[in-house]
Image (spheres, rainbow, N blue to C red):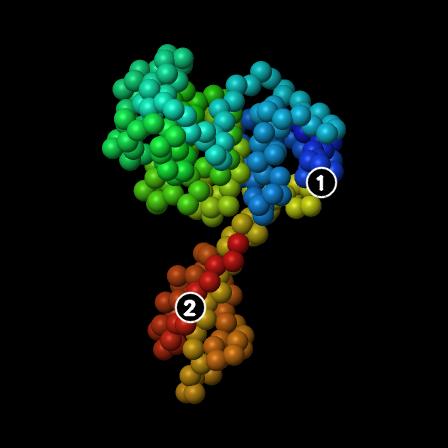
Protein backbone atom coordinates (compact mmCIF):
# COMPACT_ATOMS: atom_id res chain seq x y z
CA UNK A 1 0.00 0.00 0.00
CA UNK A 2 1.06 3.59 -0.64
CA UNK A 3 1.65 6.05 2.17
CA UNK A 4 -1.25 8.47 2.46
CA UNK A 5 -0.60 10.64 5.52
CA UNK A 6 2.48 10.96 7.72
CA UNK A 7 2.37 12.40 11.22
CA UNK A 8 5.86 13.75 11.97
CA UNK A 9 6.53 14.32 15.67
CA UNK A 10 3.17 16.01 16.21
CA UNK A 11 2.16 17.52 19.53
CA UNK A 12 -1.13 19.15 20.49
CA UNK A 13 -1.77 20.89 23.80
CA UNK A 14 -4.80 22.71 25.17
CA UNK A 15 -4.23 25.24 27.98
CA UNK A 16 -0.96 23.57 28.91
CA UNK A 17 -2.45 20.05 28.84
CA UNK A 18 -0.63 17.82 26.34
CA UNK A 19 -3.20 15.65 24.54
CA UNK A 20 -0.97 14.29 21.77
CA UNK A 21 2.71 13.95 22.64
CA UNK A 22 5.32 13.81 19.84
CA UNK A 23 3.55 11.20 17.69
CA UNK A 24 5.20 9.95 14.50
CA UNK A 25 3.26 7.54 12.33
CA UNK A 26 2.49 6.61 8.71
CA UNK A 27 -1.05 5.82 7.54
CA UNK A 28 -1.63 4.05 4.22
CA UNK A 29 -4.23 4.40 1.48
CA UNK A 30 -7.11 1.96 1.82
CA UNK A 31 -6.65 1.32 5.54
CA UNK A 32 -9.52 1.46 8.00
CA UNK A 33 -8.31 2.75 11.35
CA UNK A 34 -10.14 2.90 14.68
CA UNK A 35 -8.89 5.22 17.43
CA UNK A 36 -9.97 4.13 20.90
CA UNK A 37 -9.35 5.20 24.48
CA UNK A 38 -11.05 7.00 27.34
CA UNK A 39 -12.99 10.25 26.88
CA UNK A 40 -10.64 13.20 26.41
CA UNK A 41 -7.65 11.06 25.44
CA UNK A 42 -7.28 12.73 22.03
CA UNK A 43 -9.37 10.63 19.63
CA UNK A 44 -11.34 13.56 18.23
CA UNK A 45 -8.25 15.75 18.23
CA UNK A 46 -6.28 13.40 15.99
CA UNK A 47 -9.19 13.22 13.52
CA UNK A 48 -9.38 17.02 13.34
CA UNK A 49 -5.62 17.19 12.83
CA UNK A 50 -5.81 14.67 9.99
CA UNK A 51 -8.53 16.80 8.37
CA UNK A 52 -6.56 20.00 8.87
CA UNK A 53 -9.31 21.51 11.02
CA UNK A 54 -7.08 22.49 13.95
CA UNK A 55 -3.50 23.64 14.22
CA UNK A 56 -0.61 21.75 15.80
CA UNK A 57 1.42 22.86 18.80
CA UNK A 58 4.45 21.37 17.06
CA UNK A 59 5.35 18.88 14.33
CA UNK A 60 3.96 18.49 10.83
CA UNK A 61 1.33 16.52 8.91
CA UNK A 62 2.31 15.45 5.39
CA UNK A 63 -0.28 14.30 2.83
CA UNK A 64 1.51 12.29 0.15
CA UNK A 65 -1.09 13.20 -2.46
CA UNK A 66 -3.99 15.58 -2.84
CA UNK A 67 -6.77 14.29 -0.58
CA UNK A 68 -10.45 15.19 -0.30
CA UNK A 69 -12.01 14.50 3.10
CA UNK A 70 -15.53 13.74 4.28
CA UNK A 71 -15.91 14.50 7.98
CA UNK A 72 -18.70 13.41 10.34
CA UNK A 73 -18.38 15.25 13.68
CA UNK A 74 -19.49 13.75 16.97
CA UNK A 75 -21.98 16.58 17.46
CA UNK A 76 -23.63 17.50 14.19
CA UNK A 77 -24.89 21.11 14.37
CA UNK A 78 -28.63 21.69 14.57
CA UNK A 79 -29.71 24.44 12.17
CA UNK A 80 -32.96 26.20 11.38
CA UNK A 81 -33.45 24.30 8.13
CA UNK A 82 -35.50 21.24 7.22
CA UNK A 83 -33.57 18.00 7.06
CA UNK A 84 -34.45 17.33 3.41
CA UNK A 85 -33.65 20.92 2.36
CA UNK A 86 -30.22 20.60 3.92
CA UNK A 87 -29.46 17.19 2.43
CA UNK A 88 -30.82 18.17 -0.99
CA UNK A 89 -28.56 21.24 -0.93
CA UNK A 90 -25.53 19.02 -0.22
CA UNK A 91 -26.60 16.71 -3.06
CA UNK A 92 -26.96 19.67 -5.41
CA UNK A 93 -23.42 20.86 -4.66
CA UNK A 94 -22.15 17.34 -5.36
CA UNK A 95 -24.28 16.84 -8.50
CA UNK A 96 -26.10 13.90 -6.90
CA UNK A 97 -29.75 13.12 -7.66
CA UNK A 98 -32.21 13.75 -4.82
CA UNK A 99 -33.48 10.19 -5.27
CA UNK A 100 -30.19 8.94 -3.83
CA UNK A 101 -30.75 11.15 -0.78
CA UNK A 102 -34.30 9.84 -0.37
CA UNK A 103 -32.94 6.30 -0.43
CA UNK A 104 -30.42 7.05 2.33
CA UNK A 105 -33.10 8.74 4.44
CA UNK A 106 -35.21 5.61 4.16
CA UNK A 107 -32.35 3.25 4.88
CA UNK A 108 -31.55 5.13 8.10
CA UNK A 109 -35.23 5.15 9.17
CA UNK A 110 -35.68 8.95 9.00
CA UNK A 111 -38.53 9.13 6.48
CA UNK A 112 -41.01 10.26 9.16
CA UNK A 113 -38.84 13.34 9.85
CA UNK A 114 -38.35 14.70 6.33
CA UNK A 115 -40.14 17.96 7.19
CA UNK A 116 -38.44 18.37 10.58
CA UNK A 117 -35.83 21.10 11.06
CA UNK A 118 -32.34 20.04 12.12
CA UNK A 119 -32.55 22.01 15.36
CA UNK A 120 -35.67 20.04 16.30
CA UNK A 121 -34.13 16.60 15.78
CA UNK A 122 -32.84 14.38 18.58
CA UNK A 123 -29.10 13.89 18.96
CA UNK A 124 -29.37 10.39 17.48
CA UNK A 125 -31.27 11.59 14.42
CA UNK A 126 -28.77 14.42 13.93
CA UNK A 127 -25.96 11.85 13.99
CA UNK A 128 -27.69 10.00 11.19
CA UNK A 129 -28.02 13.20 9.16
CA UNK A 130 -24.28 13.76 9.62
CA UNK A 131 -23.58 10.27 8.30
CA UNK A 132 -25.95 10.70 5.36
CA UNK A 133 -24.36 13.99 4.27
CA UNK A 134 -20.98 12.23 4.18
CA UNK A 135 -22.37 9.26 2.25
CA UNK A 136 -24.06 11.40 -0.41
CA UNK A 137 -20.75 11.88 -2.19
CA UNK A 138 -17.95 10.20 -0.19
CA UNK A 139 -14.39 11.42 -0.76
CA UNK A 140 -11.08 9.52 -0.70
CA UNK A 141 -10.85 9.74 3.11
CA UNK A 142 -13.75 9.40 5.52
CA UNK A 143 -13.33 10.73 9.07
CA UNK A 144 -15.91 9.52 11.59
CA UNK A 145 -16.05 10.90 15.13
CA UNK A 146 -18.09 8.52 17.32
CA UNK A 147 -20.43 7.54 14.46
CA UNK A 148 -23.89 6.37 15.51
CA UNK A 149 -22.80 5.95 19.13
CA UNK A 150 -25.58 4.28 21.12
CA UNK A 151 -27.80 3.92 18.07
CA UNK A 152 -30.20 1.02 17.51
CA UNK A 153 -28.81 -2.18 16.00
CA UNK A 154 -30.71 -1.77 12.72
CA UNK A 155 -29.15 1.64 12.06
CA UNK A 156 -25.70 0.36 12.99
CA UNK A 157 -26.10 -2.58 10.60
CA UNK A 158 -26.99 -0.20 7.74
CA UNK A 159 -24.02 1.98 8.65
CA UNK A 160 -21.63 -1.00 8.71
CA UNK A 161 -22.87 -2.15 5.31
CA UNK A 162 -22.40 1.32 3.79
CA UNK A 163 -18.92 1.88 5.21
CA UNK A 164 -17.69 -1.57 4.22
CA UNK A 165 -18.96 -0.88 0.70
CA UNK A 166 -16.79 2.25 0.62
CA UNK A 167 -13.80 0.31 1.93
CA UNK A 168 -14.19 -2.19 -0.90
CA UNK A 169 -13.96 0.76 -3.29
CA UNK A 170 -10.68 1.95 -1.78
CA UNK A 171 -11.92 4.67 0.59
CA UNK A 172 -9.62 5.19 3.59
CA UNK A 173 -11.48 5.35 6.91
CA UNK A 174 -10.41 6.92 10.20
CA UNK A 175 -12.85 6.46 13.06
CA UNK A 176 -12.97 7.54 16.69
CA UNK A 177 -15.06 4.92 18.41
CA UNK A 178 -15.82 2.98 21.59
CA UNK A 179 -18.52 0.69 20.14
CA UNK A 180 -17.04 -2.83 20.07
CA UNK A 181 -19.28 -3.92 17.20
CA UNK A 182 -18.20 -1.04 14.95
CA UNK A 183 -14.52 -1.52 15.81
CA UNK A 184 -14.61 -5.23 15.01
CA UNK A 185 -16.59 -4.95 11.79
CA UNK A 186 -15.15 -1.76 10.31
CA UNK A 187 -11.47 -1.49 11.20
CA UNK A 188 -8.30 -3.16 9.95
CA UNK A 189 -6.25 -1.77 12.81
CA UNK A 190 -7.15 -0.43 16.22
CA UNK A 191 -5.00 2.21 17.90
CA UNK A 192 -5.43 3.39 21.44
CA UNK A 193 -4.28 6.80 22.70
CA UNK A 194 -2.88 6.77 26.22
CA UNK A 195 -1.07 9.67 27.90
CA UNK A 196 -0.59 11.34 24.54
CA UNK A 197 1.00 8.33 22.83
CA UNK A 198 -0.40 6.21 20.00
CA UNK A 199 -0.31 2.43 20.47
CA UNK A 200 -1.33 -0.30 18.04
CA UNK A 201 -3.48 -3.03 19.57
CA UNK A 202 -2.59 -6.49 18.28
CA UNK A 203 -5.18 -9.10 17.34
CA UNK A 204 -5.04 -10.78 20.75
CA UNK A 205 -5.82 -7.49 22.50
CA UNK A 206 -8.71 -6.85 20.11
CA UNK A 207 -10.25 -10.27 20.79
CA UNK A 208 -12.56 -9.57 23.71
CA UNK A 209 -12.00 -11.38 26.97
CA UNK A 210 -15.14 -12.76 28.60
CA UNK A 211 -15.56 -13.74 32.24
CA UNK A 212 -17.96 -16.64 32.66
CA UNK A 213 -19.30 -17.29 36.16
CA UNK A 214 -20.87 -20.56 37.36
CA UNK A 215 -22.38 -21.31 40.75
CA UNK A 216 -20.55 -23.64 43.09
CA UNK A 217 -22.18 -27.02 43.61
CA UNK A 218 -21.41 -29.39 46.47
CA UNK A 219 -21.47 -32.39 44.17
CA UNK A 220 -19.15 -30.98 41.49
CA UNK A 221 -15.41 -30.39 41.59
CA UNK A 222 -14.02 -27.29 39.85
CA UNK A 223 -12.36 -27.73 36.48
CA UNK A 224 -8.69 -26.90 36.07
CA UNK A 225 -9.55 -23.63 34.27
CA UNK A 226 -11.86 -22.41 37.05
CA UNK A 227 -10.82 -19.81 39.61
CA UNK A 228 -12.44 -19.43 43.03
CA UNK A 229 -14.65 -16.33 43.11
CA UNK A 230 -16.63 -16.28 46.38
CA UNK A 231 -19.75 -18.43 45.93
CA UNK A 232 -18.96 -18.83 42.23
CA UNK A 233 -16.21 -20.08 39.95
CA UNK A 234 -14.73 -17.89 37.22
CA UNK A 235 -13.54 -18.96 33.76
CA UNK A 236 -11.85 -16.46 31.41
CA UNK A 237 -12.29 -17.15 27.68
CA UNK A 238 -11.83 -15.31 24.39
CA UNK A 239 -14.81 -14.46 22.19
CA UNK A 240 -14.04 -17.26 19.72
CA UNK A 241 -14.32 -19.89 22.45
CA UNK A 242 -17.27 -18.40 24.35
CA UNK A 243 -20.13 -20.35 22.76
CA UNK A 244 -18.33 -23.70 22.96
CA UNK A 245 -17.35 -23.05 26.60
CA UNK A 246 -20.91 -22.17 27.68
CA UNK A 247 -22.42 -25.19 25.93
CA UNK A 248 -19.82 -27.45 27.53
CA UNK A 249 -20.62 -26.05 30.98
CA UNK A 250 -24.33 -26.78 30.49
CA UNK A 251 -23.54 -30.32 29.36
CA UNK A 252 -21.43 -30.87 32.48
CA UNK A 253 -24.32 -29.70 34.69
CA UNK A 254 -22.99 -26.32 35.83
CA UNK A 255 -25.44 -23.48 36.59
CA UNK A 256 -24.48 -20.34 34.70
CA UNK A 257 -24.31 -17.29 37.01
CA UNK A 258 -23.30 -14.57 34.56
CA UNK A 259 -21.13 -13.47 31.64
CA UNK A 260 -19.16 -10.21 31.52
CA UNK A 261 -17.22 -8.75 28.60
CA UNK A 262 -14.02 -6.81 29.17
CA UNK A 263 -12.53 -4.81 26.30
Q: How many numbered markers are drawn?
A: 2
Quickly name the residue at label 1.
17
Q: Is residue 162 visible?
A: no
At horizontal 39% and vertical 18% (from top left) the residue drawn is 90
Considering the numbered disc 1 on the image, is that residue within a helix, a strand or a loop? Answer: strand
Q: Is residue 249 above or below residue 263?
A: below
Q: Earlier in the sequence, mark 1 or mark 2?
A: 1
Residue 252 - label: none
Q: Is residue 222 above or below residue 193?
A: below
Instruction: Estimate the x, y position of residue 14 in percent, counting from the top left.
Output: 69, 35
From the viewer's perspective, tell me whether residue 161 is left or right of residue 236.
left
Disc number lying in front (1 or 2): 1
Q: Which quarter shows the N terminus? A: top right
Q: Is residue 104 visible?
A: yes
Report, in whole angstroms, how far the alpha carbon at label 1 lies from the one at label 2.
Answer: 41 Å
Camera-nearest residue between 195 and 81: 81
At horizontal 33% and vertical 24% (from top left) the residue drawn is 82
Q: Residues within 10 Å of mark 1 (few under 14, many from 20)?
A: few
Q: Is residue 219 above or below residue 261?
A: below
At horizontal 49% and vertical 24% (from top left) the residue drawn is 70
Q: Residue furthest bottom?
A: 218
Residue 258 - label: 2
Considering the numbered disc 2 on the image, is that residue within a helix, a strand or a loop? Answer: strand
Camera-nearest residue between 159 and 52: 52
Instruction: Estimate the x, y position of residue 100 in percent, counting from the top left.
Output: 30, 21
- Quarter of image, res 164: top left
Instruction: Estimate the x, y position of residue 64 in percent, counting from the top left.
Output: 63, 20
Q: Residue furthest left?
A: 112
Instruction: Estimate the x, y position of residue 68 in percent, counting from the top left.
Output: 52, 19
Q: Residues within 10 Å of mark 2 (few under 14, many from 20)?
A: few
Amino acid sequence: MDKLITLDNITKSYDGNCVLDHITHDFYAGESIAFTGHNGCGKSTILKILAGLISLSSGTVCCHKKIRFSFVPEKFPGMDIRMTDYLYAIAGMESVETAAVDCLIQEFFLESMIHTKLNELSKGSLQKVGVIQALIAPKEVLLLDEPLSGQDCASQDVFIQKINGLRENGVTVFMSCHEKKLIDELSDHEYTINKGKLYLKDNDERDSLFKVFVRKSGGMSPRADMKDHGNRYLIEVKRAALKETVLKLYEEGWELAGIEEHL
